[in-house]
Amino acid sequence: MNESRDPSLFEAPPPGEQERMVEAILFASATPMTVAELHARLPHGCDAPTALRQLASRYDGRGVRLVRSGDAWAFRTASDLSYLMTRETVETRKLSRAAIETLAIVAYHEPVTRAEIEEIRGVSVSKGTVEHLMELGWIKLGKRKMTPGRPVTFVVTRAFLDHFGLESARDLPGLKELRAAGLLESTPGPAAPADSDDAEQEDLFTPSPPEE
């Protein structure tokens, strides 16, 4: 026997309602969400990319903005109003010199192997430094390189991009942004040997020229 079905149950909601749904999902999410993750929650037939574009336009210039980090989207406080949140922010624990150097190298040279990191730094990279950055969720394992031994590589994560408000690793922050985030001291300390994990070099986040 054929059962009658309500066509409205299989039709996508109107564009305005889709926009409201995406807005609600993103506000409730603790982490940025990809288009695929949004589609998994939205009714069948919804167009998340269009809803995201409409939302981004609607929130442009507002105190809260819809921003893209990598392939994911999230609502964030407008950067020019960040000073208003100063009293409510948690003090960020500063990374060690070794961790900052390693993070910078991964960000600017990804995908990069441990051996390549050590070659650029000029000193060995401890297992603890890499594990700490992975625990923070700022770097992760990438694809293996098609070289002898097929070593694993490291790349920065979506969480790294989101923390600095970046759309991609091409928009990396400079020293001013890193100090504002609490990752570097405001005033450089005394000079230290080049191979010291506690040394601070002002040109750390200057990309090296491409390899020939």
Image (cartoon, grey):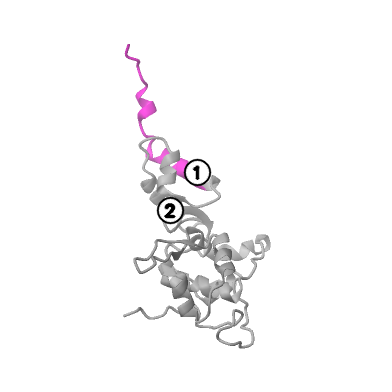
**Does the magenta-highlighted stretch encompass residue 3?**
yes
Q: Residue at x 43, y 72 (%)?
A: 108
**Residue 24 spot, x, y in % from top left:** 51, 43
Q: Is residue 149 visible?
A: yes
Front residue of 205/153: it is 153
Which segment did they paint magenta? 1-26
Name the kind of residue labelled 1 in the image.
Ile
Tag in front: 1 or 2: 1
The answer to whether residue 140 is above or below residue 126 is above
Residue 193 falls left or right of residue 14:
right
Q: Secondary structure at mark 1?
A: helix
> Please, which residue is most extreme toward the front here?
149
Front residue of 147/22: it is 147
Question: What quarter of the picture does the C terminus occupy?
Answer: bottom left
Q: Which corner quadrant of the image does residue 16 belong to? A: top left
Specify the label residue 144 is tagged with: none
Q: Residue at x 53, y 83 (%)?
A: 202
Q: Is residue 63 visible?
A: no
Specify the label residue 25 is tagged with: 1
Residue that mark 2 sits on: 56
Q: Report the number of numbered marks.
A: 2
